[in-house]
Image (tube, helix red, strand yellow):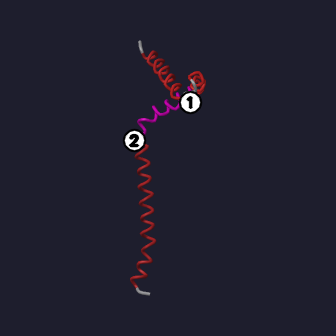
Amino acid sequence: MTRAYLSGISQAPQRDLFRQILSIATSGLLIVLSIWILEVFLPAMLWASVIALVTRRLMLSVQPRLWRRRWLATLVMSIGLSSKFADDLSP
């Protein structure tokens, strides 16, 4: 075997290892930066999740009364919750 062939074999695993480390580091950096950007929105997303979970049963009980239309039940619930929150915020 030639010397060039043997040197190419020995450097291939090092190059693959470098690519793997670089790809893991880049992925980790993207995850950290995404969390850092989303950190501002986490409280709002948490409250939205809580409100959605709490009002789900009410929406499912309203839906049969509105011809089993989910969009109509969602519209009624959205208007009702918006008016409730607007009423609570007004002096």
Place of residue 13 in the rendered image (x, y in percent of width and height, measured from the top left): 46, 71
Residue 18's spot in the image, x, y percent? 42, 65
Indicate which label's residue lies in the foreground, 2 or 1.
1
Displayed quadrant of residue 25: bottom left
Q: Assess disc 2: are there few (<14), some (14-19) or many (≥20) residues with their C-alpha within 10 Å of its C-alpha.
A: few
Residue identifier under label 1: 53
Magenta segment, prevailing SS (helix, strand or loop): helix
Label number found at residue 15: none
- Residue 1 in the image, given as x and y percentages of width and height: 44, 87
Q: Which residue extends farthest bottom?
A: 1
The quarter in which the C terminus is drawn is top left
**Element type at marker 1?**
helix
Residue drawn 41% across the image and 60% down it? 22
The residue at 43%/73% (across/down) is 12
Q: Secondary structure at mark 2?
A: helix
C-alpha span from label 2 to label 1: 25 Å
Span colored in magenta: 36-55
Look at label 1 and name its amino acid: Leu
Amino acid type of the residue tagged 2 in the rendering: Ile
Q: Residue at x 39, y 82 (%)?
A: 4
- Which residue is pictured at 45% across the width and 62% down the height? 20
80 part of magenta stretch: no
Q: Nearer the viewer, residue 1 or 74?
A: 74
Q: Residue 48: give x, y in percent of width and height.
A: 49, 30
> What residue is disc 2 on?
37
Mark 2 vs 1, N-terminal side? 2
**Image height of 39 relative to 74, above or below:** below
Q: Residues within 10 Å of mark 1 (few under 14, many from 20)?
A: few
